[in-house]
Amino acid sequence: MDLTTPPTPAQRTWTTPDVFWPSLSAATTRLDPALAVLHLPALRHNTHDMLRRAGGKTIRVASKSVRVRSVLDAVLALPGYAGVLAYTLPEALWLAEGDAEHPPIEDVVVGYPTADRGAIARLAQSPELAARVTLMVDSVAHLDFIDAVVPPADRESIRLCLELDSSWDAPVLGHIGVFRSPLHTVEQVRAVAEEIVRRPGFQLVGMMGYEAQIAGQGDNPAGRPAWGATLRWMQKNSQDELLTRRGEAVAAVRALADLEFVNGGGTGSLEFTSRDDAVTEIAAGSGLFGGHLFDTYRGFRPAPAASFALSVVRRPGPDIATLLGGGWIASGPPGADRMPKVVWPTGLTMVDREMAGEVQTPLTGAAASVMRVGDRVWLRHTKSGELSEHVDVFHLVDVVDGRATVVGETPSYRGEGKVFL
């Protein structure tokens, strides 16, 4: 999979939906749904546009939002991308080991603390893996847990990344963001950093802070202008507070340890996080596949590089067409914005009392009245990772001689027999 060259204007067919979606149907006509596709020109566009938005700062690929090893390999081959932010330690070990088809990824940071004793033991006994994988911690309890699994004298030195809480403690409103690290103040971060440096068997090599209230919250929700204005006010104030606090926290830890990296941000905050002098790299992954969550941002619009098709299998009424499956729900607060979005044919909507279901998704609207059993409907996932958990392979579509053409396929983690969480 070559992502080196951005798409030509003729390949940017996603800008014309009534061309793009029928072209995917034509390209995959011999394939039976449920099926997922990766449109390679759109993936190339997203890959290069994220580099532009990062303003010269390195992007560490968030594997949770991709879960396709060939895509990770192709993106990491490009200048400007380096390293992976994994979501479990078993996944990190798998990526760091590599195999005959995939080279080992030599810089993998586990984005969340682990309590997997078996995986910790594997990491601790391998010089190669211990040099490639970095664990996330945010408390002395994490150090105690690792020591209890393998004492310092019996293991390789464990590389650690210390996570700063990057949520905003807003006046009156209180906590805004996600509940991750308990380390919010400079003093709290410094205290844990001092303990890491003091104890044998650990090496403090990085810091991380994920500003979810900026990176994962679209600032222009459709049909809700007042809420959009409120979100933009929140994000501006949160940015101002975080720039100061993160800078002070990083300086305090750098006085204790020679940090290799300071990670921040996400797909939705590339521009803001790139301006933070305390940050050396940005984590991002969802923007590669371009889920519809990112249609709600004013500053950028990724191409729909990944999408999936389902079949009409029932006609329970004259104006209803029912799909087989469809409940491929994204993480986060339950709501319509976490469900797949029906994009083609136009004029189809989910039924309020059922929405997207595990076994079926009824659709209504003008287009439903003319659909037949066997017709296909195209949908976009909300984020990215959830799509890869539902398919074994992605069919690769490129634009060749002006026509969308299936040029191959590539397995997801699931297709390689891996389900990490």
Image (cartoon, rainbow, N blue to C red):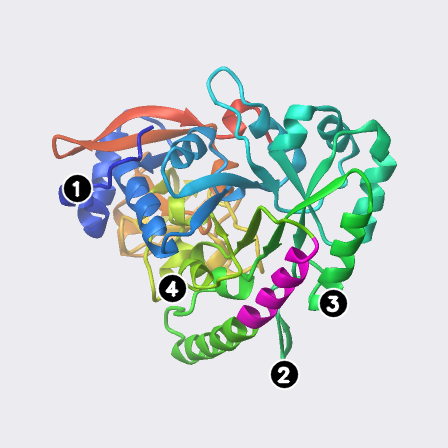
Asked if disc 2 and disc 3 are in contact, CB closer than 8 Å, the reply is no
For marks 1 and 3, the one nearer the N-term is: 1
Q: Which of the 4 image quarters holds residue 378? A: top left
Q: Amino acid at mark 4?
A: Tyr
Label 3: which secondary element: helix
| Residue at which label 2 appears | 171
Please, what is the dominant secondary structure of the magenta stretch? helix
Image quadrant for the C terminus? top right
Q: Residue 242's spot in the image, x, y percent?
A: 56, 69
Gap in angstroms between the C-alphas marked 4 and 3: 34 Å
User: Disc 4 vs disc 1: which is toward the camera?
Assistant: 1
* Residue at x 39% of width, y 70% of height: 220
* Residue in front for this viewpoint, 305 or 233: 233
Q: Is residue 90 above or below residue 179?
A: above
User: Disc 1 vs disc 3: which is toward the camera?
Assistant: 3
Mark 4 surroundings: few (<14), some (14-19) or many (≥20) residues within 10 A: some
* Residue in front for this viewpoint, 345 or 113: 113
| Residue at which label 1 appears | 8
Gap in angstroms between the C-alphas marked 2 and 3: 21 Å
The image's mark for residue 297 is: 4
In this rendering, position of residue 210 left or right of residue 284: right
Q: Amino acid at mark 2?
A: Pro
Asked if disc 1 and disc 2 are in contact, CB closer than 8 Å, the reply is no
Look at the image and tell me whether residue 119 can be seen: yes
Q: Amino acid at mark 3?
A: Glu
Q: What residue range appears in magenta? A: 242-256
Q: Residue 115's spot in the image, x, y percent?
A: 77, 41
Mark 3 surroundings: few (<14), some (14-19) or many (≥20) residues within 10 A: few
The image's mark for residue 187 is: 3
